[in-house]
Image (cartoon, rainbow, N blue to C red):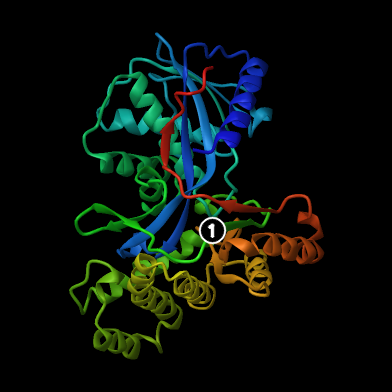
Amino acid sequence: MSDSQDKAAVERLQEYAQEAGILLEGGRIRRTSSRFCLGVEHGDYNGTELFGVGTDRFIWLAYVATASPCVRLFSGNYPEQGVVEFNLNELPPPLSAEFAGSWARFPLGVAYILQREGYKLKRGMDVVLYGNIPGGGMSRSASLTLNLMLSLLEVNDIELEDPFRIVDMAQAVETDYIGSPCGQLDQIMILFSRAGLGTYYHPQERRVDYVPLGEGPDFRLVSLDTGTVRPGLEKSTYKIRRAECERFLSLLQTRYELQSLADVKDEALYEEIISKYSASYPELCDRFRYIYFAQQRFYRMLAAWKEGDVATVGKIFREDGFGLRDDYKISGPELESMCDIARTVTGVYGERMLGGGDKGAAGVLVAAGSVDDLKQAVGAAYPGSYPELADKYAVHALKLVDGVSVLTEFNI
């Protein structure tokens, strides 16, 4: 639980509700988290296993069911867009230009996908929401989509036995309705995360295990929000990298029986592929190289996590960052500046960019006693390199939390 954050957020929600003229009496508050991926970043659409945690940067959504199919929403993060209102029976088609630049495409997409998948939505809801998740790297869009979907299902008394059905539909909101080519890492790491535990996803079995951290030194995960704004995966390098990986997989499938790049785990097969394709497709081989070695690192990282060996977890996290920067080429100058600063701080175990890439936030594993030193180092160096971001960047020490919570202790 994050009481101080929750209390402040609820007060904001109440102010926004009054500002928007939306009555929420008798409603509920659903809170969805951000996520911090420890491995494998960009592995979901390449078939790797995944490991991460839910973290305490949130989206809070206050909602109350209505008797009609009308949905009304107000975002405290986008007050200039006013109240978004639509009828569940009159939804615009996917990729609608009318809502391309509006956050409204997310609730519209949730309603559209749920109905496309056969769920009858007869009741709408009145909603006020607010979030403090950085705009890139910690899965703000997935958190928002999951929150909206779970809330709309609840007000229509729809219960799903298979939580992966939620994952699939939340992904479809972004891929099919919005046109953002995301994988499922973000949705899985938020929906399934549990306080104090690592979430270990096995894609072949579609199974989640929870892995406690072994006894070791006290440390913190820290988000270094660069203050930059990422325009969305559909307009980012992420889309290019995903297409490159899909192209290389198609090339390999003409010679090898592979379902994903992650299927290549044998060193001899890896070396054979690099030998055959590096001259003709050097950039595609770079992407493949990152995925192959990231998988090798993944199992070492997982073993270190179980043993509480934070120094090794951090070292592998750093190595992964070099791979993302040099082979996958998905990072950005502001992200790398944050990482460069973090590496100068005694007590930092490891650092790298987070999420889809280009912009957003970097992540750090740091000794608990060195968090203030990290904040001071960033404050001293980052604004000098990016004066235009001096009032936008932020440093957040994070806690491991449940991904989805209904805050029954607060009244609206």
Q: Horizontal placement of 257 versus 371: left or right?
A: left
Quadrant in which residue 350 is drawn: bottom right
87 over 200 or under it: above or below:
above
Q: Residue at x 40, y 86 (%)?
A: 280
Q: Residue at x 32, y 43 (%)?
A: 167
Image coordinates for residue 388, horizontal then vertical, percent: 80, 56
Q: Which residue is mark 1?
A: 221
Foreground residue among 40 and 345: 345
Quadrant in which residue 385 is drawn: bottom right
The answer to whether one can see residue 181 in this image is: no
Foreground residue among 395 and 85: 395
Image coordinates for residue 366, horizontal then vertical, percent: 57, 65
Q: Horizontal placement of 317 versus 121: left or right?
A: right
The answer to whether one can see residue 122 in this image is: yes
Name the residue furthest top.
67
Q: Residue at x 53, y 38 (%)?
A: 2
Image coordinates for residue 111, horizontal then vertical, percent: 39, 28
Q: Residue at x 79, y 64 (%)?
A: 380
119 over 203 or under it: above or below:
above
1 over 123 or under it: above or below:
below
Identify residue type, mark 1.
Answer: Leu
Q: Horizontal placement of 27 versus 15: left or right?
A: left
Foreground residue among 330 and 364: 364
Query: At numbered mark 1, what does the secondary structure look like: helix, strand or loop?
Result: strand
The quadrant in which the C terminus is found is: top right
How many numbered discs sit on the rendered protein? 1
Q: Residues within 10 Å of mark 1 (few under 14, many from 20)?
A: many
